[in-house]
Image (cartoon, coloured by chain):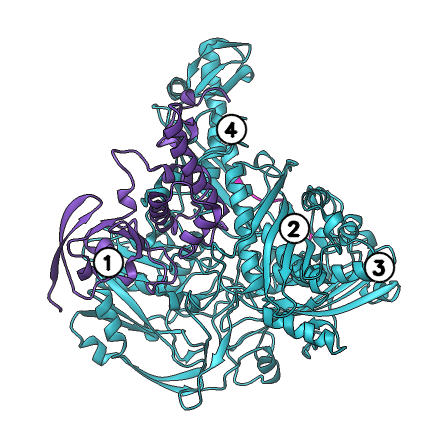
Amino acid sequence: MTHNVQIVLTVNGEATEVAFAPYKTLLEVLREDLNLCGTKHGCELGECGACAVLLDGQPVLSCLVLGVDCDGRTVTTIEGLVTDGRLHPLQDTFADLGAAQCGYCTPGFLVTAKALLDEQTHPTRDQIREALSGCLCRCTGYQQIFEAVEAAVATRLSTLDSSTPDSRLTPDSGLQTPDSRGPR
Amino acid sequence: MNIIGTSRRRVDGRAKVTGQTKFADDLVLPRMLHCKLLRSTLPHARIIRVDPARALAHPGVHLVLTGRDFPTPYGILPVSQDEHALATDRVRFVGDPVAAIVARDELTAFEALDLIDVEYEPLRTFSGPDDSLRFPEPRIHDYGDAGNIHKLVSLEFGDVEEALATADYVFDDTFFYQGNTHLPIEQHAALAAKDPDGKLVLWSSTQTPHYVHRALAKALELPAAHIRVIATPNGGGFGGKSDPFNHEVVVSKAALLLDRPVKICLTREEVFYCHRGRHPVLMRFRTGVTRDGAITGMRVQTVLDGGAYGSYGVASTFYTGALQTVTYHVPAYRFEGCRVFTNKPPCGPKRGHGTPQSRFGQEIQLDKIAERLAIDPADLRLRIVEQPETLTANYLRIGTIGLAECIRRVTVAADWKHTFRRLPSGRGVGIACSSYLSGAGLPIYWNDMPHSGVQLKLDRSGGVAAFCGATEIGQGSDDVLVGCVAEVLGIEPLDVRAVTGDTDLTPVDLGSYSSRVTLMMGNAAIEAAERARARLADAVAKKLGVPANRLVFAGRRVFDAEEPDAGVSFAEAVQLAETMFGTIGTTGSYTPPRSAAKFKGGGVGPSPTYSYSAAIVEVDVDPATGWIQVPRVWIAHDIGRALNPTLVRGQVEGSVYMALGEALMEEQTFRRLPPKLSHALVHKFPSMLEYKSPTTLDMPEVFTELVENPDPRGPFGAKEVGQGPLLPVMPAVANAVYDAVGVRIDEVPITPEKILKALEAKAAGKPARFGPTSFPDVPWPSEPIEVPPPWKGGDGRAAETRTSEVRSTKSEGAGVRS
């Protein structure tokens, strides 16, 4: 057995100390040593994008990053998109608009889309396609994913522009009671 | 209706976008060990010796299993019990599992694979149907219709020779459909454990827990009642997780022997070896038509390259000939199908199961017919659309048909009249149509029991638990279950807890295949919910002093329709009912109507009702390079009723996407290693990088039209949507290429290279096409099974063997009648 290495990194905003076998990828460290199973794997060869996470804010394929290279760095996984119990706008729009079918590629798409929205306030459809082109989805045909990203952009803009957010797009809208949705 | 028909977040949406959905490989149990399979490096060989000694001595290895540990065969179909969890005496393709290591971690198990010594004696490799038809020996399996022919079928409904002889034109075309694979993003994974009572529990990414349950009982020789199979949500299935798999049997056995949990997660390369994907099919279509386009008769022949095992192959073979009659009226029909064994990963059911291949041929041939007759291909199809509520030549009972409306919708949306044959050279549009089952009418193991069962438990809190064996593979089956129950009971989807895919806890649902779940589970759910509602209504009626039939269930209340303020909350209604009747639990079940087909082979094709689709695809083709792009697709789908339109549109768009992959780039193909290595037949590219599938950059704009004409056979009128919309897209691409550059590409994938070759042939004055030019010599049965069609006085039985057929229907109980 190989001796473990130990690193300190920030994971989803928390200072985290973790020890693991030195050959492990960031993907394996997250899933096996930190119990962050929201990050998925589809090939472990950098081909599918399912394991995307943000490393210092940039999307990376965690199956191609060695855990030991993450010492002192900042990692954001799908578990880190929820803040104060509220879903990220992208999570709401993905859930509402059919952008997650089986949900297996969804975490990779969501963190990659978050990185895009962190850098671009008004990405075009082509920029969205380009930014997400490293992630494969076999269920949706991508169209509802594009629409969800665009809806999240629109939500953010409408939140900035006015104080009356679209009720459909408020955090966790799926948990609203029928009363709060008004008559149908 | 409050819930049905409304676009809304699926019930499992929040879990999926927060990464909390627990897939099989996300499960971790204390003291869990890890399993790896050693797979064959030769395509066809006798196993002389498997020696696990060195592997067993490796530190951290707990167990080595070989074929000796699994003497009992299994398989998905009763007629093809030809698989062993680990090879006993023979390997049949590169990737066939030979031995298993169970170790403390994955890496140790992986290292120990190299320490298993296997000695092989190579046998002749069968690389395709030509080999398998030519050489009967050595046989890949010791069963099947002849030599290396797995299955031969020949059916005739009416006199096709006469129908062709009396036609104004007879078209004779050959087509080839290359094989491809499902490529779910989730690799198959399974975790087995001995539960505290000593019984077996298996969590697996399977679409068919019920059939895995049966297979485990057989292969492990255990009482089925002591086996629990839990289907974890599948990270994509598409048909690829519908067979019982080697790894599921292996980890189950290992967990029982070691009394420790054992997990396996396949590598991506191994997923390519599990396969069960689209059969490569060579096909010949002879179709007679009158001058005005009516079909007089059709003869279809198919040869399927089945790969190394039976899988669903007998059903796949019949499916290549089953649905030609369901879209257009075909008065006389003959079908001959042949499936051969080859030394490649086994083929099986992929989205559309056996029907996309022949749909491809049929719809391209119709395009050729339309051109020869100088009829617009959309108009031609409108002329010959089959009638609703009819029985086809091969005794499939059709329900509603929205196909004509689908054709009208897409032609308007795509401005067909102004684009077809009118776009500049290099741009083109093509149209094609299709139909698909809303669930197989017969179960794999023949019996008269329900195909789907739903059990409801109503809690005093107002919460409802809905139990059903259905399996959530991303299509939204949990949402359908919850939506149907909530609609009937007048509560909210999130008030209902779906408990699904667990053979210990849930009533049997046969599984997520054949587009059966929405229709069958939905009907069962409605029945269970209506029974619960009746109980509640009785109790509330008594309390309010109004007739039960005046009560309305809506908005989490039960109230008097004539005096809406008089009512109780749903939770109070449950309490009243529980007071009156005791614990409130109800069941519902669904059994499809009896099939009209009573001949051998009639078990494949019947369905409670059929969905219909029409697609128009636009292409840009560069005549200099053959480079092809698809900028836009219009598709209309006859759904009956969309239960949750967001999910329905997702299924349509996802089907279009997967279809474009098949049409343009995806292929599961093989090559020989160099002679100085083993010369073995190996998968050309078992990786996601080289197995090309469409990315976000390749996906065109898709314009979806849903045609809603509720079918009384479906839950709230719904028909299937998961598979049908895939079918018309591939031939529509081929027809669009012809419109763009005037060449026929009679096979998929339609690659730039093939287009260029066809353009070169055209320029050289040769036939302007790329595709197969011959059809193999198949030893078809000299006499087909003759079944007179309904309009010739037939009753669904074969002409000469009526009495014996009836008897075999009763006695066989052996799945696909063969």
Q: Position of residue B652 (x, y in %)?
A: 56, 47
Q: CA distance from mark 1 to mark 3?
A: 63 Å
Q: Are marks 1 and 3 in contact (CB under 8 Å)?
A: no
Which secondary structure, mark 1? helix
Residue B373 circle label = 3
Q: Which residue appears at 50% of the width and 59% of the height? A: B694
Q: Position of residue B337 (x, y in %)?
A: 66, 68
What is the letter of the purple chain? A
The residue wearing badge 4 is: B530
Q: Chain of mark 4?
A: B
User: In this image, B29 relative to B168: left or right?
Assistant: left
Residue B508 in magenta?
no
Q: Which residue appears at 47% of the width and 32% of the height? A: B485
Q: CA distance from mark 1 to mark 2?
A: 44 Å
What is the letter of the cyan chain? B
Q: Are marks 1 and 2 in contact (CB under 8 Å)?
A: no
The residue wearing badge 1 is: A26
Which secondary structure, mark 2? strand
